[in-house]
Amino acid sequence: MSLTLLFPLILLGGWLASRLFTSLKLPPVLGMLLCGILLGSLGDKVWPAGLIEMEPFLKNFALVVILLRAGLGLRRKVLNQVGPTALAMSILPCLFEGSTLTLLLHYFLEFSWPIAGLTAFMLSAVSPAVVVPAMLNLSEKGYGQKRQVPTLVLAGASVDDVLAITFFSVFLGMASQEGIHWTSGLWELPRSLIFGILPGIVLGLALTYLFKKHHQTIRATEKTLILLMFALLLVYTGTLMHSAALLGVMTVGFLLLEKAEPVAHELAAKLAKIWIFAEIILFMLIGMKVDPKVAMQAGPEAIILITLGLMARSIGVWVATLRSTLTSKEKLFCVCAYLPKATVQAALGSVPLSKGIPGGETILALAVLSVLFTAPIGLLAIRILGPKLLDEDGTETL
């Protein structure tokens, strides 16, 4: 199928699926994901060479849009309010799930420790593509604002991804015998964070100066184009440096809101419109990468492993929020919000296989199954339970 035909089919199919699921009172993102799986089931006939080359850029573009929107909605006062809990949410759930899955994969699937570790932390990453739009939607509707629950989840989930990808990279290096020792590999985490956030600070301050000085002469649409262009360059640079560039993108939005609030509101409005297009592209492409046949190869044992990992993650979330001011219902919502997986698993699931890591096919099957299993459950849990567990007007839930 040619790219000229496939691209309109992706947009049309994603839009129709989202409208259908909206009418059924289900998350529209779930419709896009399932439509993508259906389209991708046609196999190699669907994927033209042009789309394969464009896929990483299109996914990065969509993630940049949604993370800029997230950054443009983060206020320093709110971050200070959720700071310690957000830090705990960034680390503990990922470590609980990753450590538990490492043990299970080693002892039950007989993976070596490095292969068990890379598989575990690839599976443990929460999906920003699913979580961020859902939190923004709840925040815009006023849910959970008294204790800033959506902001807490946003802040925690962004670093959770960095942590998971860093551990995946460390264990991948060990498994592929690239000479990376775990002690030196762990330095990748602070290095990744520093070299991800610092360029974001520099870019955010530079754009703040530019947009404030030329507020009247540069139209809002032009400001948005400039912002997107530099944010994409930031991601490209971060890829070369192996840094947490997506966290830097969110930092750009945060600084623009902090230093130039009128401009930030203009940009947020424009990005909300662009997201309509970007969302379809992102979730359709994620769905198209999912192969249900591969997932079924893993069998019921894989579902049990993934479920046990989610239980460990849920315990991690509960521990992270234990000393917070959140109510029991809000803590339960945080557990639900940390369930969905999609982006990282779709991107990294095939990497071990491509590098010739033993058990690569099983790892890919686990990645695919984790997306099929957790994305719908997480989406439905956030959509259905969010309004019930979070307050709309700031009154106590308990």
Image (cartoon, rainbow, N blue to C red):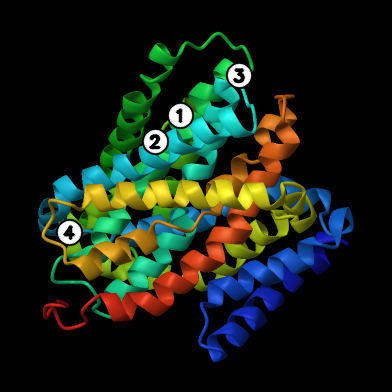
Return the disc, 2 or 3, that comes first in the chain's sequence: 2
Q: Label 4, secondary structure: give it.
A: loop
Horizontal and vertical percent for residue 88? Answer: 23, 43
**In 3D space, how far apart are the residues under numbered discs 3 and 1 (Cα atoms)?**
12 Å
| Image quadrant where one finds the N terminus | bottom right
**In 3D space, how far apart are the residues under numbered discs 4 and 1 (Cα atoms)?**
30 Å
Q: Residue at x 25, y 60 (%)?
A: 151
Mark 3: which amino acid? Answer: Ala
Q: Which mark is residue 167?
A: 1
Horizontal and vertical percent for residue 161? Answer: 42, 43
Mark 1: which amino acid? Answer: Phe
Q: Are marks 3 and 4 in contact (CB under 8 Å)?
A: no
Q: Nearer the viewer, residue 380 or 227?
A: 380
On the image, numbered disc 3 is attached to which residue? 175
Q: Spot the residue most to the top.
A: 179
| Residue 2 in the figure: left or right of residue 347 | right
Q: Label 3, secondary structure: give it.
A: helix
Q: Residue at x 56, y 91 (%)?
A: 23
On the image, numbered disc 4 is attached to which residue? 75
Foreground: disc 2 or disc 3: 3
Residue 284, relative to residue 233: is it above or below?
below
Q: Nearer the viewer, residue 101 or 292?
A: 101
**In 3D space, how far apart are the residues under numbered discs 3 and 4 (Cα atoms)?**
41 Å
Mark 4: which amino acid? Answer: Arg
Q: Nearer the viewer, residue 131 or 94?
A: 94
Q: Residue at x 36, y 76 (%)?
A: 385
Q: Are marks 2 and 1 in contact (CB under 8 Å)?
A: yes
Judge whether residue 249 can be spotted in this image. Answer: no
On the image, numbered disc 2 is attached to which residue? 163
**In 3D space, how far apart are the residues under numbered discs 2 and 3 (Cα atoms)?**
18 Å
